[in-house]
Amino acid sequence: MSKTIRVGSGAAWWGDRVEPAKLNAEQGQLDYLCFETMAEATVSAAQVRSRRDPTFPGYDTYLDERMRAVLPACMKNGTRIISNQGWINPEGAARRIVALLEEFGLRGVKVAAITGSLITDRVLSLTDRILENDEPTHTLESSLISAEVYLGAEPIVQALREGAQIVVTGRVADPSIFMAPMMYEFDWDPLDHVRVGAGNGIGHLLECGAQVTGGYFSDPGFKDVPEPWNFGFPIAEVQEDGSAIFTKVAGTGGMVSVQTVKEQMLYEVHDPANYLTPDVVVDFTQARIEQVGPDRVRVSGLTGKPRPPTLKVSIGCTEGFIGEDMFFYAGPGALRRAELAKRILQERFKIVHLQAEDVRIDFLGVNAIHGEATPDNVPEPYEIAVRVAARTQSKEEATKVGREVDGMAVSGVAHTGKRVPHQDRTREIIGVWSSLVPREQVPASITYFES
């Protein structure tokens, strides 16, 4: 019989739930448990926090919670862990994992930290143009706070070959985290774009966690999902030819169906024939998706094309501040009162000389989502939340939003419902731009630690 490995999801983003990861660790019979915790803005936000808070360690703020939940079962069951929870400090994350292992009495566990993706200090010399607007990257110099390259699976594979039971990384492309165990276990050539393409396609299906098992899928009366409060994270039973059966721990809520798999397959994929990753260009167009049992879907036919010569870089830049607050109206005439409140605030912002690049006053429940595309004949709601936000270049200007909204409590419209003022209703904006760098200019490094 051909070799099969079981790869399970432990997280789809920084704020994901921990309980399904614990369940996969304990009952998933996994060979590998993989965590994806970095969205595009995570690194930039971590850099901002690091600048302001010298005590911030630079890795996933839920690292302790996640590792405490899964380490005992993973080490007991021989499950290896691969995670990008290192954010901007993979070595610090690895040291913390070692400390947790020792706390559990788990000795002799080899932990690898993969670094090299952070290129803030040299991104302007390695890149040329900004992908979004074709401007030179040096135009970002004054606002630059971080630059992170999307590495691929190869350094993870090397760490596994050298005996690491836990691998923690910085920025690695999401599918690569899940595909690395396949490259290692099946000894795939990194340039075998057919198998690596299939593996990256499987990784893409796993990277968003519960989206394959019914999360982000429910539409009551149209697409009903059993027990949506109790989703299990997906597990892929992967074979050497690049096919896989997707399933979940028995007894969990949600479902694994052809439809849930199809929706995730196309999620965030602009061109199904050319899905770019550091390892390969994935081609989903020949995929075969079959229901082979309850909560068991077989995916085959995935393939790929040779990998691109460049790697994508996410460049985080400061782009000013947002001031934001909210107040409420309810009962007959709520919309009329909200419209008057909007006019009052617009005039008061002029009085205090608010210097803003953009000001929005939205009525939640009426036009906040669709904006100017909102139909004219929307029925008047019984209650409305008024959201006020302004984008400014300085925090001082952004604070004017909250100050003027505070005044609505006694100097506004009848029956204004106001939240208790909180200390800071401003936040810094981190813009994310993209560029490309030659892959040979970004070598990865591996450092090992042991409990």
Image (tube, rainbow, N blue to C red):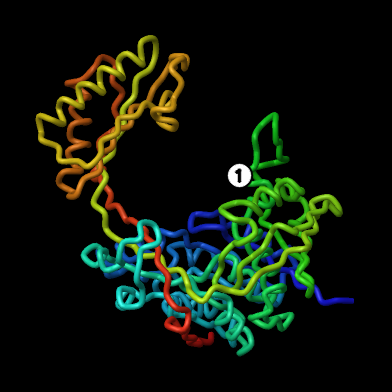
Name the residue rendered at 75%, 68% in the picture.
29
Q: Which residue is mark 1?
A: 216
Expressed as whole percent of the image width and height from the top left, the position of residue 33 reads 64, 68
Q: Is residue 79 above or below residue 388?
A: below
Expressed as whole percent of the image width and height from the top left, the position of residue 297 reads 79, 55
Expressed as whole percent of the image width and height from the top left, the position of residue 38 reads 48, 62
Q: Is residue 95 above or below residue 173?
A: below
Disc 1 secondary structure class: loop
What kind of residue is marked 1?
Tyr
Expressed as whole percent of the image width and height from the top left, the position of residue 186 reads 74, 80
| Image quarter hosting the N terminus | bottom right
Q: Residue furthest front?
A: 134
Q: Residue furthest right?
A: 1
Res 73 seen here: no
Name the residue rendered at 19%, 49% in the picture.
393
Front-most of residues 264 and 94: 264
Q: Is residue 344 above or below residue 146?
A: above
